[in-house]
Image (cartoon, rainbow, N blue to C red):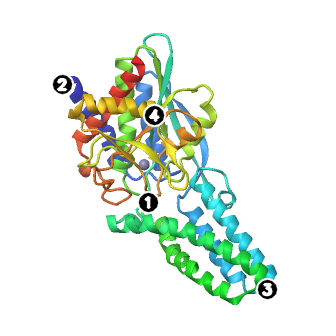
Amino acid sequence: MEAERTHVSRAMSHVRHLAETIGPRGSTSAQEREASEYVRGVLDGLGLSPRVQPFTSAVSAWRPYALAVALAILAVAIYPIGGRVTAAIASVLVAAALVSALLEMNFTANPLRWLLPKGRSQNVIAVVPPAGEVKRRAVLVGHLDTHRTPFLFGSVARLRLFGILSPAGFGGMAGLVGLFAAGAVWQEPALYYASLAPTAVLLLMLPMIVEPDFTPYTAGANDNATGAAVALALTQRLKEAPLSNTEVWTVHTGCEEVGCYGADAFLREHRERLDGASFITIDTVGGPGSGPCYLTREGTTKRYHSDPGLITLAGEIAAERPELGAYAKAMTLPAYTEGAIGIKYGLPSITFVNFRPDGVLPNWHRPDDTVEHIDADVLARSEEFVWELLCRIDAR
Ligand SMILES: [Zn+2]
């Protein structure tokens, strides 16, 4: 019990340091770097010789989509200028914007990224060796950066609107591609009039996806000081009580909130050494009314499935330790976690994101994502659950 309390207070003190002492930690910002220096200091103190991995990243999650929508609207203006030629140009332009946006949603290089500004960020990587011979590896991932506070995240109703607008936007752009391609062949005025309906949807969307970049960053107590803190507290625990045969890598990433650039940079460099490693993402795990919640899948345009073996293991823990209050969920929102990157690189992955049982992620990307809204008991149960998972991976 005494030991348990130590772990809890450690994680809570990391949360406080990240979210209060440092505060908002925008992707590629000086505060994000300060957070990475804090983590490096703690790991250094453990004698783990952490490594800092620098990388280049986008600076906004929203700009690629704002640019894609703006290009589609531009195509609507180009279409009627010069008959078949401009109709064909308009169709190609929207198609390129649509394909790029879909690639962006799936963490893949695309022309929108080439056009937009970049910044520098960093991961902090440490490796905790096991007591015995290395037979398995596991990776704990927690991001240090925080999101902005968009209007669309301001209430549950607005988030629902976002859930509708996002596929409507993609559908609208696909509609424009078809109508404009047909117009390049038939030059039928009705085709242009029909294109004004999807255009109206895009015009409604544009201000809502431009607005986020004009809002302040959140302190990110829940998203994701909690996940980073749990990964850090678990590293301290692993150092004191190493696993038998599992080498554990901890990665405190930068730039998750703008498209998982940190996790991607990490796996691009280390994927080969980590073949078969369990990739465990910890993101937003301290909201009141939530339990440890592990994802079975995520992704909208493409599905990213958690590893069936790890889901089974987590299910066993949930059943055998009901006091932890854990449950599984599928994430169906147009959002992502770094778990998708583990899956993209072919690693057996599982992600912890504490959605409440009613599907709400407390204080997500909002100004009130502050330390006073963190439930220390939820945080402690989440940490204990991941610890138990690591022990069972080690015992396999
Ligand atoms: Zn997050």
Q: Which residue is mark 1?
A: 148
Alpha carbon distance from label 2 to label 1: 38 Å
> Residue type at mark 4?
Pro
Does label 4 or label 1 sit earlier along the sequence?
1
Q: Earlier in the sequence, mark 3 or mark 2?
A: 2
For residue 308, the mark is 4
The residue wearing badge 2 is 1
Q: Position of residue 315 (x, y in %)?
A: 34, 33
Name which of mark 3 and mark 1 comes first in the sequence: 3
Question: Which amino acid type is shown beneath numbered disc 3?
Answer: Gly
Q: Is 312 above or below relative to 371?
A: above
**The quarter of the displayed image where residue 121 is located:** top right
SS category of the residue bearing label 3 = helix
Foreground tag (3 vs 1): 3
Distance of label 3 from label 4 (alpha carbons):
54 Å
Q: CA distance from mark 4 to mark 2?
A: 32 Å
Q: Earlier in the sequence, mark 4 or mark 2?
A: 2
